[in-house]
Structure formats: structure tokens, C-alpha cells
Image (cartoon, coloured by chain):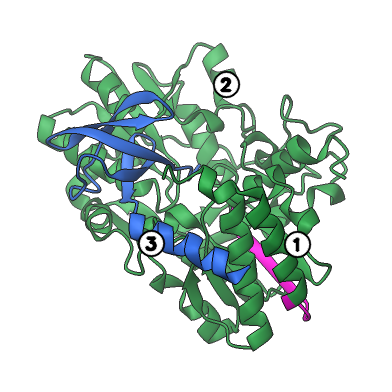
Amino acid sequence: MCLAIPARVTSINGMEAEAEVGGVTRRISIMLTPEVKVGDYVLLHTAYSISVVDEQEAKETLDILRQLV
Amino acid sequence: MKYIDEYRDPQLAERLVQKLRERSTRPARLMEFCGGHTVSVFRHGIRQLLPPTVEMLSGPGCPVCVTAIADLDKAILLTELPDIIVATFGDMLKVPGSRSSLRNARADGGDVRVVYSVHDALEIASGSTGKSVVFLGIGFETTAPTIAASLLEARQRGIKNFYVLSLHKLCPPVMKSILDLGEVNLNGIICPGHVSAIIGSTPYQFIPRDYGIACVVSGFEPLDILQSVYMLVEQVESGHPTVEIAYSRGVRPAGNVRALELLHTVFEVCDANWRGIGVVPASGLRLREEFSNFDAEKAFPVSHPPPREPKGCLCGEILRGVKTPLDCKFFSKKCTPDSPVGPCMVSHEGTCSAYYQYRGEDGG
């Protein structure tokens, strides 16, 4: 139930935004992440973005994994 | 980057498993707290990849599964009141209450609507004059801020026929409660990823400090989980348990400050009744006095007869990690996803459902 999926924000209008998930555009609320910018990925939970995905951290995690193994 | 496929790379996973096998020498008993992790562990066959030293148990992190049967009975009774629409996430529909379920209540003429988001319930309220909409507030810290946001929006838009039955629950207090029960002997916990996106990683610090148990906040893709298991094993091997974040692309140590602010504007902490565990102090959320005009508990008090748990169902023990679905005589016989006896078979992320869906009907 705590499912959240990465979605890319394509437009913002106040506290509402449009985000693309697997080729489908959805209307979402950004009340919980007002700092989000167009082009950012967010974690989308029941039509609310709950976190802005940190691209740098995402890359570093993969780098760490590749170095580890 | 799309943040999915990169974390499903089979070659990287294979090498990580190899590394894990080399590193793990001591027994490591790990619990994945969150039902979303349970599903991922089963879907990707992760248990089968682990070395014999590493054992994984499933925890109580399924909000539908831990909703007390008395609270479910209350929700079902609400559907019998005139001019009430009960809006809920779909998972709740089939959970058997003491005497009925929301699905049966709907068949009996109750107006029960399944929504994808609390926002949909708010829109139903806004378009339904003369009727009241009660949203069943089921969920952990991940979901509670969205409910808070919807109530702030309802207040701002002057929507007065929208109510929430707040059954929200908090994860760190129940983790403490399970550890205090002392029934499961754990070395590490895979902490919930999206709960932690809201609360951060600091609320888990008491776990290594007071219980000597390792903690890693994990994402949900197979590489995320393997990496988290590796980090936990590393902590167990080094003998220095601490709290680490493997899911740093989505989780910051302080969490989502804005979401927490909204959550605490609308809700206050209270005791909560967990199915299979009982009343856990300071593990729930109720609406603050300033928001009491949205409180379904106050607007529509219902009295219900004492709840009846299904006899012989092991959901309680399974939620505490003490038993597995294979120990239950109903599993895949009397109890299946089509005809569930207990909540752990209903919810997609319930442990019984995960065993049934991904390990075959015999769960083996």
C-alpha cells in the first residue's frame, strides 16, 4: 500500500502538476514536494508526489554497486 | 535514467549475490518490515538466492493487514447509515470483518466506492450534495500526509461533507513493540522505503542503539533489496549495527520536512490497535481538535458488538514474524485470494498473498 513509482514531471500549475509514468500522463498533486521542477522525477504515491528523486544519489548508488562487485 | 530498469540488471544482481555469499559467515536473521518489500522479495525470488547463513522473515508492514477487526466492523456499519458514501482503497473491500465485509455491505446496498487517491474521494464529496463522504484513512506515514493535504484542501475549498475515519498507523513504535515482545530474534531490519521517504532514517536510531539490530532503508527493485541485504550482512559481520540508507535517491535522513509539517498540522499521535499485536502506545494518528469537523469518528459515532476474530487464522502470528503461512492449516485450502479467511491473504502485499502468488499454491 505504500507503493510509489518514479514519474517525470512534465508541467506544473500551482500545487498541481502533470507527470508521465510509463508513457501515460497523470494529474498529480505536488503539495508535499512544492520544490519540484519540470523535468524532475518524483516518487508518486496515490497521485501525490512524496519525494523528488535525487539523480546524483541514484548515479552514486549504481557506481558504488558496480565498484563493489 | 528512469530509475527502474537500472536497478533490475541481472548481471549486476548475480555478482552482488556472489559477493554476498563470500562475505556472509555469521547467521543473519533479517526482517523485511514492509509488505511492498515482501512482494518484491518473492516476485524476484530473492530468498532462493541468499546463502544459507541469511534468513528472511516478513513483518507487519501491510496497513490493510494490521487494521483491527473492530475498526473494520465500524467502517462496515457506516455503510448502513443513510446518505453516506464510504470511499476506500480497493484492498480493504474483501477483508472479512466479524460479520461482513465492505464488499458484502456494497452488495447489500451500501454506497462503497473504490478510489485510487484520497483526492478522488474529495472530488466525490465536492460533487455530491446532500450526501456525506467518509474516506477510510488506512495507511502508514507514507499515506497520512496525503490525507492531511486533502483535509487542508477541503478546508480551503469549503467542502463540508468530507470526513476521514483515521486509522493511520506509525511504523517505528510497532517495530519497538515487536522487538519488546521478544518472539523473533533478529539481527537486521530492512526498513520501509516509502515510509522513510516521509520520516527519514533518524526515527530508527533506537533500534541499533537499544537492541543491537542493524537497519537499512531499502528501495523496492531487486538490486535495491540485494544491496540492502549486503549492507545488513556487512553490519552483522563487523559487529557494528547502525542505520544506513540504501535508497538515497528517494530518502533523506531528515525525511520530507514539508510532508511532516502538513501531517502534524492535521494529525496528532495517539495509541492504536494493531491486528495481531494489540494496542501499541503512540503508534496511531487522530485528527487534531481544529480538524474535528472532518472527523468521521465524531460525526458518525457507531456502536458495534464485540469483534470476532476468525478462529484458527494465523494472521496475527504471521504479522509478528513468529509463524509463516505454511504453518497455517487454512493456507491455500480454505483461505485463498478469492475466498480469504484473514487479511494477510486479501491484500496484495500481505504475506499469505505473496506466498500464494509467487511460490505456488503449496507455498513451497
Q: Is residue B12 left or right of residue B364?
A: left
Residue B246 in sight: no
> Among the chains, which one is green?
B
According to the picture, the residue beneath numbered tag 1 turns out to be B322
The tag earlier along the polypeptide, 1 or 2, is: 2
Residue B343, image x, y percentages: 65, 39
Q: Nearer the viewer, residue B207 or B47?
A: B47
Disc 1 and disc 2 in contact, CB within 8 angstroms: no
In the image, residue B32 lies in the stretch drawn in magenta:
yes
Q: What chain does badge 3 belong to?
A: A
Q: In this view, does B106 lie to the left or right of B262?
A: right
The tint chain A carries is blue
Disc 3 and disc 2 in contact, CB within 8 angstroms: no
* Residue A57 circle label: 3
Do pointers 1 and 2 mark residues of a single chain? yes
Residue B360, image x, y percentages: 83, 36
- Which label sits in the foreground, 3 or 2? 3
- The quadrant in which residue B302 appears is top left
Start and end of the magenta stretch? Answer: B23-35
Three-letter residue code for mark 3: Glu
**CA distance separating discs 3 and 2:** 43 Å
According to the picture, the residue beneath numbered tag 2 turns out to be B103
Q: In this view, does B162 lie above or below B264?
A: above
